[in-house]
Image (cartoon, grey):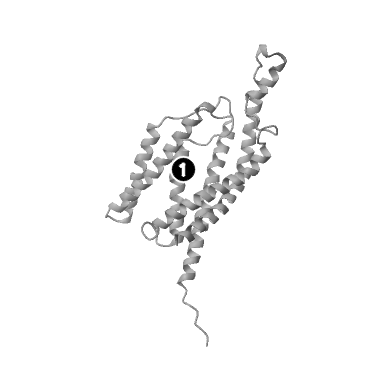
Amino acid sequence: MIRTLVVRGLLIGLLAGFVAGTFAFVFGEPRVDAAIALEEAAAAAEPAPASAGAAGHDHAGAAGHDHGEEAVVGRPVQKAGLFLATGLYGLAVGGVFALVFAGLRGRFGPRGDGALALASAATAFVAVILVPFLKYPANPPAVGDPETINSRTALYVVMVIVGLAAVAVAVATARRVTAGPWQRRVAAGVAFLVPVVAAWLLLPTVDEVPEGFPASLLWNFRLASLGTQLVFWTAFGVLFGWVGDRVAGRSALPPAPSSG
């Protein structure tokens, strides 16, 4: 059974990854192109060192990150690789989700596969995507100091761990409360928010948006980034749950009467 679930998770994750990749290509890539254009324009506008002489223009052109046709990996290849990246992401998430789903099945949450898949996907989106995103949202090219990428990545991972821990605390709290369903939900919600809010307040804020960067471009890029994840988890949860209900419905059908 676990093997079947894992194979199902891999295939559905791959499909959901391509769906999310399509969304990112349509809504996210134009913002990336605009941010790269701003970055390259700012690099070209930097004054060349006086001692550089005729080579100064080459130095100024190389001061920024080259994302154009002359880059090591050009933009057309990067755009094509977007679908590879989202597909691999879907494979990885699908495999892990299937293993977690197998552990939750019949023990936590709704009894039906469809409802459990949707609830699990929604929970994963909130814990792994939304919680860290609200503290450390995604940034387009030209935003962020390359020297702080390791510290920013570490902070983001910490927020992911906090989100997962908050879910575990909320589930444990809900199982301990013996009152009615509304009381359990309120208790679980408070138990989830306490570590999340504490992390938001205690962890340092990262604001490396350069002065003059268009606020609308930054906002639209972040919306497209979050939307890509929302599309992925929605597609994955719906498809995984739909297939699970279909399989359960077939196995519940009575055997066909034998002829003869």
Res. 145 visible in picture: no
Could you say where residue 247 lies in the image, as x and y percent from the top left? 49, 66
**Residue assigned mark 1:** 130
Res. 103 visible in picture: yes
Q: Quadrant of residue 39?
A: top right
Q: Nearer the viewer, residue 119 or 52?
A: 52
**Which residue type carries mark 1?**
Leu
Could you say where residue 40 lies in the image, as x and y percent from the top left? 65, 27
> Which residue extends farthest front?
3
Position of residue 162 in the picture relative to residue 175 (left or right): right
Q: Residue at x 63, y 32 (%)?
A: 36
In the rendered image of this protein, does residue 86 appear above or below residue 35? below
Label 1 Cα neighbours within 10 Å, binned few <14 / some 14-19 / many ≥20: many
Position of residue 164 in the picture relative to residue 149 (left or right): left
Position of residue 245 in the picture relative to residue 195 (left or right): right
> Which residue extends farthest bottom?
260
Could you say where residue 244 lies in the image, as x and y percent from the top left? 48, 62
In the rendered image of this protein, does residue 75 appear above or below residue 21? above
Could you say where residue 243 lies in the image, as x and y percent from the top left? 51, 62
Q: Nearer the viewer, residue 212 or 196?
A: 196
> Which residue extends farthest left?
178
> Which residue extends farthest right?
54
Q: Does dot 1 land on a helix, a strand or a loop?
A: helix
Q: Residue at x 46, y 43 (%)?
A: 130
Q: Nearer the viewer, residue 245 or 68?
A: 68
Q: Residue at x 50, y 79 (%)?
A: 256
Q: Quadrant of the N terminus?
A: bottom left
The number of numbered discs placed on residues in the rendered structure image is: 1
